[in-house]
Image (spheres, rainbow, N blue to C red):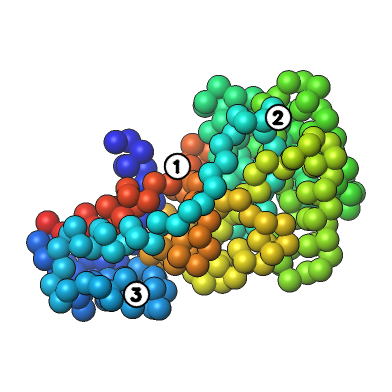
Amino acid sequence: MAMFGFLKKAFGKTTEAIHEVLPEKKSKLHKDEFEDILLEADVNYELIERLLEGLPETITRIQAFNSLISVFQYRAEWIEPGSYTPFVEMIVGVNGAGKTTTIAKLAKHYLNNGRTVMLGAGDTFRAAAIEQLSRWAAKLDIPIVSTRQGHDPSAVVYDTIQSAQSKGISNVIIDTAGRLHTQTNLSEELKKMVRICDKALKAAPHRKMLILDGTQGSSAINQAKAFDDIIGIDGIIITKLDGTAKGGAVLSIADELKMPIYYMGTGESPDDLVRFKANEYVNIILDEIFL
């Protein structure tokens, strides 16, 4: 139940936006009202058309739930930590999406679950990224492998995995540069980092996670497609939804990308990361609409 509360907090601004369209909850909803609510929550218009297609003019909560949950009914391979030791994750995403903070949240999540964590500061393009990640490592009291700005990030990757293996660390989280995905040198760098992971430990990285800024709407979807083309993305973490009324973007992201959404960032502290559950997400929206 606490988890549901965390998720609800993340969608506070979205539920406020729903109340502007629909000041009072109803037992049944007119199709036009449902359309207005979805538009206000920043759901992609083409998706809204599809969601409304099979619905009657007057909609019950169950009909609305079945329509929205259908977006998440795609086959996606979930990769759980623990199948490898160390379990190596590579974190990608553009600058400003909340990558470093999310790495700290993920590390804290693993620590809370009794696992050991080592960080690899693979964004050697920005000195600030190395400093920020090192501060988080100190705060969480976990080891980090880093180098100076401008050094080869693949060397950091190799050293981190080797060090984690020798120390018996269960989880490795590797940061990467977040320059715009259109830059060829970055895509080559990412591909090389993936190859070096596999050299250091067969089949690593075991999970390539993309951090998406939930306030970005369709441009986040374009970023995801670009990163997926470069190295293949295994899953998504959506950040910053607590600061926006665009909570419906989650539906658009799921519909377009058909990838597992693993977690959502719900605030600024290291504990503000919750496991995403589609049925809880849909119910949070519907709780604001129906009696």
Q: Badge 1 is on which residue?
A: 275
Q: Earlier in the sequence, mark 1 or mark 2?
A: 2
Give the Cα separation between the discs numbered 1 and 2.
22 Å
Q: Amino acid at mark 3?
A: Arg
Q: In the image shown, does 168 or 18 lie closer to the viewer?
A: 168
Give the Cα separation between the discs numbered 3 and 2.
43 Å
Q: Earlier in the sequence, mark 3 or mark 2?
A: 3
Work out which quarter of the rendered image holds the N terminus and state it: top left
Q: Residue at x 37, y 51 (%)?
A: 278
Q: Badge 3 is on which residue?
A: 50
Q: Is residue 179 left or right of 280 when viewed as pictured?
A: right
Q: Amino acid at mark 1?
A: Arg
Q: Residues within 10 Å of mark 3 (few under 14, many from 20)?
A: few
Q: Is residue 254 left or right of 180 when viewed as pictured?
A: left
Residue 7 makes an appearance in the image: yes
Q: Is residue 141 left or right of 150 when viewed as pictured?
A: left
Q: Label 1: state its secondary structure.
A: strand
Q: Label 2: state its secondary structure.
A: loop
Where on the picture, by quarter, is residue 210? bottom right
Which percent across, then down, holds residue 200? 84, 36
Q: Residue at x 21, y 78 (%)?
A: 32
